[in-house]
Amino acid sequence: MTALIDSYDAAFFDLDGVIYLGPLAVEGATGALAALQARGTTVMFVTNNAARAAQVVIDQLNGLGFHADDHNVLTSAQVAVAHLSRDLPAGAKVLVSGSDSLAALVGQAGLVPVTKASDEPVAVVQGYDPAMTWPRLDEAALAIQAGAKWYATNDDASRPTERGLVPGAGGAIAVIALTVGGEPTIFGKPFRPMLDEAIRRTAAARPIFVGDRIDTDIVGAANAGIDSLMVFTGAHGKSDLIATGPGERPTHIGANVGALLEPVRTVEFTETGARCRGQEAVVRDGAIVLTGVPEDLAGQLDALWAVAHLAWQHTGLDTADALAALELIR
Ligand SMILES: [Mg+2]
């Protein structure tokens, strides 16, 4: 059997909604990752979350049964600080508007983390900090007005919690942008530096990125010029997939990360529609209709992949009934 991963030498993984969901591993993820690492695939875990130190992420992954260490975990804070240390002279003062772990990274890179605009920092770096306060935002805004370069680890608009969405790092950036105008240099997905750094660190020739969000993961992979696998264990679902425009579409879809070890789904267009393996979608009266609804998840994903290709080729067709029939897919 030829597996999807056979075409790639490395697999990069988003974490939340792909590898784990809150405190729990995504079902099947530990087994799939162990199988990938056993067959020699280079694995890297990539997270936009800049509030937690890499070691905290490493410990969490190992605690859940994954194999992670310094070499295969990358946070947006690490990427940001790597760039800062290239952009700024050694010993430069940087106002850190983020977590203590981000400030510690800045210090380890030979820069001097400061907290006040009156310290005359040459740069401001923003990162997610659940303990952010308004006076600290004031200092960042004042430093940028005084001429400091403006950076941010990532700009995620929100952060999912068990109680609902709370403001993400993008919220704090928006506060500063409303105040002083302009925008920072951003490193996390969907911006290129994050996945470029993953490629640099792994020396991968042909990596694939696995993610659950279109706007950060799939677009991020496209921006970095690498293939992607969208999985349905996290934030986005079938209607998000259908709604994507060119440049926002995954190369592959799968139920979960285990799809890397399974055969590739390919779609062929027919005279009346599109077919993926045994499943066919056709156009009828301005709508996309399935010729049959498979009862198993793999078959429903085949059908979804056929529906998606047809919908992307003929925009404006009604996909509501076809998608509703695929009830095993979120
Ligand atoms: Mg995610």
Image (cartoon, helix red, strand yellow):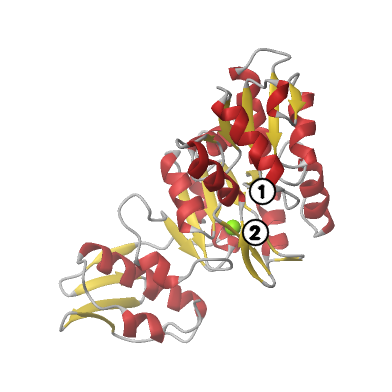
Residue assigned mark 1: 49
Q: CA distance from mark 2 to mark 1?
A: 10 Å
Amino acid type assigned to the residue bearing label 2 in the image: Asp
Residue 85: where, in percent of width, then height?
A: 66, 20
Q: Secondary structure at mark 2?
A: loop
Residue 73 visible here: no
Residue 276 x/y as whole percent: 34, 70
Question: Circles 2 and 1: CB distance less than 8 Å?
Answer: yes
**Residue under the image location 44 percent in, 77 percent down:** 299
Q: Position of residue 64 (x, y in %)?
A: 80, 60
Q: Left or right: where does residue 163 sit relative to residue 249?
A: right
The 10 Å Cα crowd at callout 1, few under 14, some 14 to 19, many 20 or more, is many
Q: Which residue is mark 2?
A: 16
Disc 1 residue type? Asn
Taking the image in four quarters, ligand 1 sits in the one at bottom right
Q: Residue at x 55, y 66 (%)?
A: 235
Left or right, 295 with respect to 271, comes to: right
Name the mark on residue 183: none
**Mark 1: is the Cβ under 8 angstroms from ligand 1?**
no
Residue occupying image coordinates x 40% and y 86%:
325
Q: Is mark 2 within 8 Å of ligand 1?
A: yes
With respect to residue 182, does 269 lie above or below? below
Residue at 69% from the left image edge and 16% from the top image edge: 92
Numbered label tally: 2
Q: Nearer the viewer, residue 58 or 98?
A: 98
Quarter of the view holding residue 106:
top right
Q: Residues within 10 Å of mark 2 (few under 14, many from 20)?
A: many
- Left-right relation of 20 to 3: right
Residue 193 percent location from the top left of the image:
53, 34
Residue 108 visible from this viewpoint: yes
Mark 2 or mark 1, earlier in chain: 2
Q: SS for tag 1?
A: loop
